[in-house]
Image (cartoon, rainbow, N blue to C red):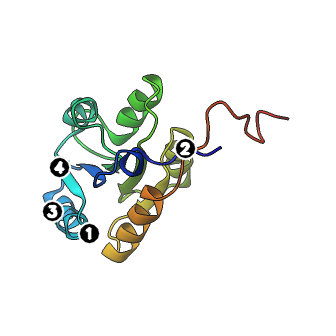
Amino acid sequence: MPIEPAWQSENRVPRVLIVDDDYEVADPVKYALEGLGFEVTHVPDGDRGVEAVDRLKPDLMVLDMMMPGRSGFLVLEHLRRTKRVGIRVIMVTGNEGERHQAYARMLGADDYIHKPFAMEKLVASAKALLNTPFPDPEQPTSESAQ
């Protein structure tokens, strides 16, 4: 049986963490998501993003791929290594390489949006992902059942 997102089961507003060093991208995203009633925090680099995940327990992360210090890939690798579940991830990037997109998805990115992007596209993705239940870890997936 699917597991509902934490914000729904805890009867609270969704928490969103934006990890992006580009304020020209992060500020409008923060403004748009706050306009939906979400609790939004922005940090400008991957190291602070990893720290903020532990502190804030976000439901959604909007994650830039290319940042100084720890990249978005390294943040995703950390989440996977520490078995963080219950966090949806939208990776935003100016990189259009298909290898990068495939690697991001393998690491657990739920969506991959190219910069520059229409705010409506990111907002629609955020709303959809925040309302999507998580698979039950106790139930075998079709891949593991084979």
Label 2: how many residues lie within 10 Å, few (<14), some (14-19) or many (20+)?
Answer: few
Disc 2 target residue: 3
Disc 3 target residue: 27
Image marks 3 and 4: residues in contact by CB distance under 8 Å: yes
Quadrant including the N terminus? top right
Image marks 4 and 2: residues in contact by CB distance under 8 Å: no
- 107 horizontally vs 115: left or right: right
User: What distance separates the C-alpha of mark 4 from that of mark 2?
Assistant: 27 Å
Mark closest to the chain's N terminus, 3 or 4: 3
- 120 horizontally vs 40: left or right: right
Q: Say the numbered circle drawn on residue 124.
A: none
Q: Nearer the viewer, mark 4 or mark 1?
A: 1
User: What distance separates the C-alpha of mark 3 from that of mark 4?
Assistant: 8 Å
Q: Nearer the viewer, mark 3 or mark 2?
A: 2
Mark closest to the chain's N terminus, 3 or 2: 2
Disc 4 target residue: 42
